[in-house]
Image (cartoon, rainbow, N blue to C red):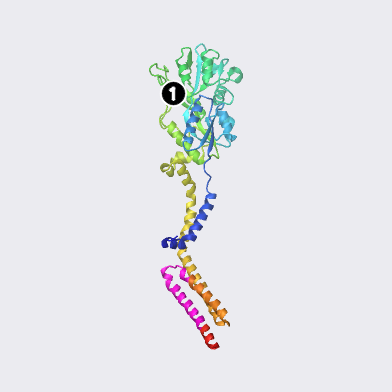
């Protein structure tokens, strides 16, 4: 480094900079961990609403460089069990199933869309209320599905015991197909209103959709259920489907995560929920979802913060990766500033002390050489002292000090010359004495 300004800067601040860098390295070792690079999402049956929803969230995570695996599962109960067992990080879970499965180890990010319970039946079977399903062949979904848990609960509350009807383990498209073929009498299915087979069932003249007159009562009895209205013509206005307003009882799909999932991943999932579900649907007004209100699983701390305050300040400004790093690193700012300020303030005094100390060391060496020169008894001893004085003079001649210390340095050099002349004078006197 031939630049004097750089050399002077390093002399002043080299040691503090080294200490600060060491402090940063130690601090980063204790910084909050980065988000995981791989996430597993428990979706649902292939082609279903849960699978599509899981893929929506997977795409959002992949967009920021996170590898995502979407699992095909049996449904809500299976998804929640996987999240609790730590075999999945995220799951799409119907509200209401936690009562049977439990929620230990899981947390909710909020409900994201309605999933009405549709009770379709063949016109040859009179079904005006749930009690009319006794002695009927009813599709209530497979074991491990949210629809089976909900259907079983509501039928039991309505006084229809498991032995009073024939439970058929079909759900979704399979249940709709069986109903259209007359293989079953009724189907209790959970799905969004835009699903194709829902429209097919509403359109078919041999099939009727039961209006849940008890929807309001069920919503009061179970906070995770909400009454919704399928308005006349909302499915197909040209064909006026449905022909009349239909009351439905609706659980909601909620995003459930491991309770130890990284907060940054949770925040990103909630962002995706607002983007994907905040605009409303055939059953929900804009802004209804996502919401923590319908969840039957405890809302995570990060979700509470997000619902109260929205995305973090840094997330509003920076991309996900940058914002996440800064949010993890900001906690280091206070101790680092506490370390930097005194170091910067102490650098000039420390440098001045080092200069003075070096000059004092040189003076100590000079005094020893003067004493050695005066005590020398032979010309060889004085020549050795003289050579050491020449080395000291060269060493002090090559050193650079701040202007404020030039006077001390030149005084030292003058004293070195004085001692050198003294040694030379003693050598000359000895030579004359011999003559």
Inspect this view and state whether residue 126 appears. no
Count residues near mark 1 (Cα–Cα under 10 Å), then give few for <14, some for 14-19, many for 20+.
some
Quadrant where the image shows the N terminus: bottom left
* Residue 325 percent coordinates (x, y): 48, 45
310 sits to left or right of 145: left
Residue depicted at x 44% and y 34%: 274
Q: Main secondary structure of the magenta part?
A: helix
Stretch in magenta: 396-425
Classify the position of the C terminus by image quarter.
bottom right
Quadrant of the rendered image containing residue 194: top left
Q: Residue 183's image quarter? A: top right
Q: Nearer the viewer, residue 403 or 349?
A: 403
| Rendering coords of residue 314 (x, y %) | 43, 44
Q: Outermost residue toward the front?
A: 435
Q: Is residue 187 above or below residue 17?
A: above
Q: Residue furthest left?
A: 238
Q: Which residue is mark 1?
A: 229
Residue 73 falls inside the magenta stretch:
no
User: Is 422 colored magenta in this rendering?
Assistant: yes
Position above or below: 25 against 35: below
Q: Is residue 49 visible?
A: yes
Q: Secondary structure at mark 1?
A: strand
Q: Nearer the viewer, residue 108 or 325?
A: 325
On screen, residue 100 versus residue 199, left or right, reads: right
């Amino acid at each position: 480094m031939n630049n004097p300004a750089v050399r002077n800067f390093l002399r002043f601040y080299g040691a503090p900079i080294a200490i600060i860098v060491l402090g940063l390295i130690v601090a980063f070792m204790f910084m909050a961990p980065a988000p995981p690079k791989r996430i597993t999402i428990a979706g649902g049956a292939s082609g279903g609403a849960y699978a599509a929803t899981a893929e929506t969230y997977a795409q959002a995570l992949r967009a920021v460089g996170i590898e995502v695996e979407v699992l095909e599962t049996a449904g809500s109960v299976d998804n929640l069990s996987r999240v609790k067992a730590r075999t999945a990080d995220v799951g799409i879970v119907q509200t209401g199933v936690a009562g049977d499965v439990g929620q230990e180890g899981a947390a909710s990010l909020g409900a994201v869309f309605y999933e009405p319970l549709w009770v379709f039946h063949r016109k040859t079977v009179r079904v005006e209320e749930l009690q009319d399903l006794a002695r009927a062949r009813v599709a209530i979904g497979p074991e491990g599905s949210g629809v089976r848990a909900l259907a079983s609960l509501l039928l039991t509350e309505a006084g229809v015991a498991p032995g009073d009807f024939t439970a058929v383990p079909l759900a979704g498209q399979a249940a709709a197909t069986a109903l259209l073929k007359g293989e079953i009498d009724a189907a209790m299915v959970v799905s969004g209103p835009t699903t194709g087979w829902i429209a097919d069932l509403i359109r078919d003249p041999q099939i009727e959709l039961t209006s849940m007159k008890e929807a309001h009562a069920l919503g009061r009895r179970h906070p995770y259920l909400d009454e919704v209205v399928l308005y006349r013509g909302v499915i197909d206005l040209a064909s006026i489907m449905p022909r009349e307003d239909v009351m439905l009882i609706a659980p909601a799909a909620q995003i459930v995560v491991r309770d130890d999932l990284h907060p940054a991943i949770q925040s990103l999932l909630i962002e995706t929920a607002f983007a994907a579900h905040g605009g409303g649907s055939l059953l929900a007004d804009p802004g209804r979802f996502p919401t923590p209100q319908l969840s039957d699983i405890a809302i995570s701390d990060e979700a509470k913060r997000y619902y109260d305050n929205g995305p973090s300040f840094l997330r509003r400004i920076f991309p996900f990766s940058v914002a996440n790093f800064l949010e993890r690193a900001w906690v280091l700012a206070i101790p680092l500033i506490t370390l930097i300020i005194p170091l910067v303030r102490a650098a000039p005094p420390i440098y001045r002390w080092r200069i003075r100390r070096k000059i004092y060391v040189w003076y100590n060496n000079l005094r020893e050489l003067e004493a050695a020169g005066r005590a020398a008894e032979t010309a060889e001893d004085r020549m050795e002292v003289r050579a050491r004085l020449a080395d000291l003079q060269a060493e002090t001649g090559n050193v650079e000090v701040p202007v404020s210390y030039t006077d001390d340095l030149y005084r030292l050099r003058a004293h070195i010359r004085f001692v050198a002349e003294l040694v030379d004078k003693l050598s000359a006197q000895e030579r004359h004495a011999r003559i």
